[in-house]
Image (spheres, rainbow, N blue to C red):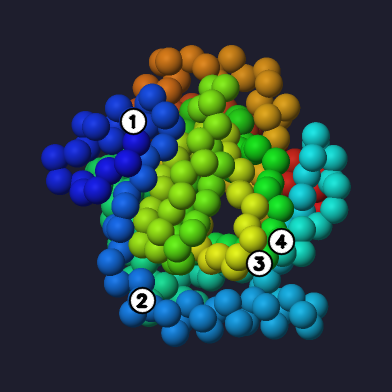
Amino acid sequence: MEVNTLHRKKGAIRKAMIRDGYFIFRQFFTNIDEKKDGIDQIVAEMKEDREKKRKRSTTIVFQNFKNGVDEDNDKSRLQTLRKFDQQDQWLQDISTATSELIEDLFYKDTEFLQSHASILLSLSGCREQSLHYDFPANELASKTCYACVVFLQDDGKLVLQTGKKTHRPDFKKGDIVVFRGDKLHAGASYTTENVRVHYYFYDKGTVLAENATFLPSFYENMSWQDDENHVENHHRRSQERDERNREAKRRRMQEYNKSRK
């Protein structure tokens, strides 16, 4: 569902999130052109890092997975992370406004965390990713998690899967798409350069797998995936948490992360 303003739209947004798993704010940011110099600078830095293959570069090349197997690296899909205190003012403004939007919609009076800003740069020839999830299945079973993409240029794209239907909405600069953590999605292919900012929002205590995504096979035994009650409860933070179970989950994820290194 596409929503142009937040005022008096919260009910429609929540229904759309339950039905479709995502919603789009059109032209949420109307001053992207004012940030062009900063955007151009960070894009130039990412390209320079890619060309020089700097050992200490913060720019990484996405690994492309197909059927669960590391096929090869897509050298036209780049990412760099910026912590809040490392962000220029234009990016801090975007990070703050996006966080306030998500808080107002889903985390009012509830503690939540926002990830670092992940700058995504697709160059000409960038291939479409395999469909995947951004959050570990064991965390989604009891946590409230969302992902958000802010488009900084026109001709943005994203692949979103709802049941057996594939949605391929187009985005203009200033648009935002927010989707649930259990939403199957993929980065689209690009024939022209495009840059955007990606964020995660999640309950305090959620354990993330850094720079990792999860293929559908990772979720195939999760009975909640098509459960309406789970989808409804995705908008509510659990009021009771079993600390021992949560600590056990945290240890398992830490062991999983270590095994990937």
Residue that carries the numbered disc 1 in the rendered image: 16
Report the amino acid beneath label 4.
Answer: Gly
Image quarter of residue 92: bottom left
User: How far, Cα to Cα, is label 2 from label 1?
Assistant: 30 Å
Q: What secondary structure is found at the residue carrying circle 3? A: loop
Disc 2 target residue: 33
The disc, 2 or 4, on the residue closer to the chain's N-terminal end is: 2
Q: Say which of 114 and 31 sits in front.
A: 31
Mark 3: few, some, or many residues within 10 Å (few <14, many ≥20)? some
Sequence-first disc among 2 and 1: 1
Nearest to N terminus: mark 4 or mark 1:
1
Nearer the observer: mark 2 or 1; the answer is: 2
User: Which residue is the site of mark 4?
Assistant: 125
Give the residue type at disc 1. Ala
Residue at 31% x, 63% y: name it.
29
Above or below, 213 relative to 91: above
Coordinates of residue 58 in the picture (x, y in percent):
67, 73
Position of residue 69 measured from the top left corner of the image (x, y, whole percent): 85, 40
Measure how far apart labels 2 and 3 are at the Cα level: 20 Å
- The kind of residue on which mark 3 rests is Leu
> Residue 79: which quarter of the image?
bottom right
Question: Earlier along the polypeptide chain: callout 3 or callout 1?
Answer: 1
Front of the two marks 4 and 1? 4
**Which of 10/135 is in front?**
10
Q: Residue at x 61, y 49 (%)?
A: 187
The front one of 173 and 244 is 173
In this view, the residue farthest toward the left is 8
Residue under label 3, please give it. Answer: 123
Mark 2 and mark 4: Cα distance apart in space = 25 Å
Identify the secondary structure beneath mark 4: loop
